[in-house]
Image (cartoon, helix red, strand yellow):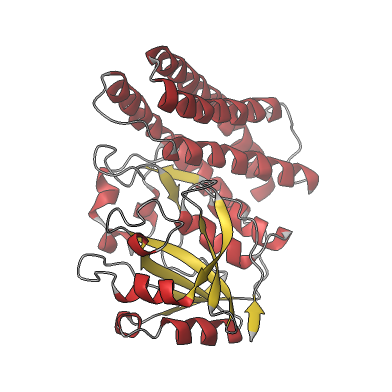
Amino acid sequence: MKKILPIYKPFIISYKHHAFRLAMIGDDQNYITWILNNYLQLYTPYDFLKDMHWLDFFLPKIDESCECLDVEVVKKIDLKNGKVVNIIENAINKKSYLYLIYDGYYLNHHFAYKKEVFPSNMVIFGYNSYEKNAYCFDYDYNKSNTLQKLRINYESIIEATTLLDTTKCNWFSFIFTPRKTFFTIDLNLIKMLLKDYLDAYSTYKRYPIYNECSPNFKKSFFGIEIYKSIYYYLQFMKKEQIESNILPFSILWEHKIVLNRLIKYLIENKLVIRTNYIDNFKLIEEKAKILRDLMIKYSFSSDKSIIDSMILITNKIEELEKISIPLLINDISNVCL
């Protein structure tokens, strides 16, 4: 038997924990609306000296479902006992996706293949029981280094899950089932998140449950203060005290893409009237992309003059946001009255 579920091009691709969920829910305007409501705040969950994922989106909702997906935790013991094929086929037959944690050492598309033990994650969206393989969505690290649809044989997946050291990896696998949910633009939520961003307010304080789950929030920069981390990081790079890392700059660029998509939506639906800040937001997005591209260039050349250019561009982005975001908030406030 062969069954394949749809997998969509995700709106956010830099981090897999965002990309995979968005790839499962769809790409129509309904789900784009949910993204525009939620992907507006940034924070620094980790110290950049300790974790390369030190810049991320802060989402108002804490659980794994993202309001668009029903979620079921997969028992680790079932994966350790080699039941992963049954789990895959049963999930797909119910039109659900398997978000699977595996050891990259055993899968040949992963950069850790036959080199090191490395817990990783992917989405399984189909299977072919005749050929004994699964259809998977993951970064093809050893070829294009982009998100790709891959076919992986059952034997390799069994090996990569049964031999995963769960004593050292506290991640869980999940079965996700898309919900048929209708979303509307939430101007009050958007206004709150934009104001939090502008004021560098720690948004987690608005949600009591966040206070119970992670001590990292109290040490994090939120909103426009994340540029402090970027400046610190670039200075450390200049002193050769840290390696270059494209990921936070990709997230920063994607944040600006969301802002421009939001403005486009608000204008098309006549929810804002003034348009005098549109060019500024387009310029912010352009400069964020340049910043990302310069980081790629630096990773190959190690030319320190590139870092000087990145500092200047970061300063300009921050300056433009301090001018433009208040204007957008004011327009949204007029509609919320």
Looking at the image, residue 165 lies above or below residue 95? above
Query: Which quadrant of the figure has residue 104?
Result: bottom left
Q: Quick one: quadrant of the N terminus?
A: bottom right
Is 89 placed left or right of 305 in the picture?
A: right
Query: Which quadrant of the figure has residue 30?
Result: bottom right
Please tell me which residue lies in front, 291 or 153: 153
> Going 27% across and 30% down the picture, which residue do you hit?
242
Please tell me which residue lies in front, 152 or 293: 152
> Going 24% across and 69% down the picture, which residue do you hit?
165
Residue 7 seen: yes
Residue 185 seen: no
Residue 64 picture location, percent across and down: 44, 68
Outermost residue, left side: 167
Residue 46 picture location, percent across and down: 29, 45
Looking at the image, residue 298 lies above or below residue 267? above
> Going 39% across and 77% down the picture, which residue do you hit?
158
Residue 61 picture location, percent across and down: 45, 62
Please tell me which residue lies in front, 12 or 329: 12
> Going 48% across and 29% down the picture, which residue do you hit?
296
Outermost residue, top side: 305
Is 2 placed left or right of 55 in the picture?
A: right
Looking at the image, residue 23 lies above or below residue 249? below
Is 263 placed left or right of 68 in the picture?
A: right
Residue 322 picture location, percent across and down: 51, 26
